[in-house]
Image (tube, rainbow, N blue to C red):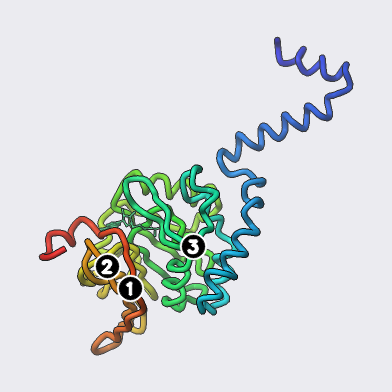
Amino acid sequence: MKLMSFLQSFRHSGKIGGWGLIFFNLILFLGWGEVYPDQLDKYAQRRLEMVETQIKARGIKDKAVLEAMRKVPRHLFVDRKYWEEAYNDYPLPLAEGQTISQPYIVALMTECLGLKKGDKVLEIGTGSGYQAAVLAEITPQVYTIEIRRNLVERATGILRKLGYHQVKVKWGDGYFGWAEYAPYDAIIVTCAANHVPPPLMKQLKIGGRLVIPLGSTLYFQTLTLITKTATKPKVKHILGVRFVPMVGEIQKKGRP
Ligand code: SAH
């Protein structure tokens, strides 16, 4: 049936309003792709509960971090089959054997950075883009590097769709940092490393903070906070963690 006569038939039957609405919703649905308002709202309550029971309850106090965790729709950064689990207290699988960290770990690492609005922050290991979105809720200057091309494309797509246009995503080996935009107020490494890549320390401002899971890339690491000073860096051990390994240049340098 031709479109005009199709629409005419509803006008005659007096149902143009209802069908028009359905038609309008269909356009909205197609336009938004996977992200339509219904799905954003559906999980809002779970997000609030996640912050109360998993994050505040464990001692995270930074208001900007709590607010960011309440806002970012975590489910949209994982595969649709994990949406129902997206606000639970554990990490979830991403493509290519990678993982999105447990919400508490994302909040803890973000709080360690002590970010203020306007700070420039570099992330190594974009993964899904979720951590980058959390950072972007706090400061507009977010730079993130991912070594797996497929993940770069997915993360860029969802960040754009959700309006995080200020996040700059680069495909490359984060071991070398991103010299073009250095120095950074803060650096967050979200893959396990057996040493701090020297270029990252170099690209950090004096007084800047770097958080990294440091230890064996195959087994366990210690979440470590390093503050750069004019002399020796200050090092603080936060807690035991398990992250997927950093790959690329770091693997050429001694033990895993
Ligand atoms: N922060 C992510 C989760 C990171 S998982 C999120 O919020 O979803 C760790 C990521 O580090 C993986 O995507 C992995 O591909 C990436 N990675 C591993 N080695 C890397 C390297 N040398 N440079 C940049 N990214 C790397």
Image coords of residue 67 (percent x, y): 59, 69
Quarter of the N terminus within the rendering: top right
Which of the two labelled residues, at mark 1 and mark 3, occupies the earlier sequence position? 3
> Looking at this view, is 189 or 229 the one in front?
189
Measure the alpha-carbon separation of dots 3 and 2: 19 Å
Instruction: Tell me where residue 199 sits by quadrant.
Output: bottom left
> Tag 1: residue type?
Gly
Image coords of residue 123 (percent x, y): 37, 64
Label for residue 217?
none
Q: Is residue 42 above or below residue 212?
A: above
> Looking at this view, is 120 or 85 the one in front?
85
Which of the two labelled residues, at mark 3 and mark 2, occupies the earlier sequence position? 3
Check disc 3 and report its element: helix, strand or loop: loop
Check disc 1 and report its element: helix, strand or loop: strand
Label for residue 89?
3
Residue wearing tag 1: 240
Within 10 angstroms of label 1, few (less than 14), some, or many (20 or more) residues? few
Q: Is residue 117 above or below residue 140?
A: below
Q: Is residue 213 above or below residue 126?
A: below
Measure the alpha-carbon separation of dots 2 and 1: 7 Å
Asked if labels 3 and 1 touch by Cβ distance under 8 angstroms, the answer is no
Asked if labels 1 and 2 touch by Cβ distance under 8 angstroms, the answer is yes
Label for residue 220?
2
> Looking at this view, is 154 or 199 the one in front?
154
> Looking at this view, is 240 or 41 the one in front?
240
Whether ligand 1 has any atom under 8 Å from the Cβ at mark 1 is answered as no
Q: Is residue 205 above or below residue 154?
A: below
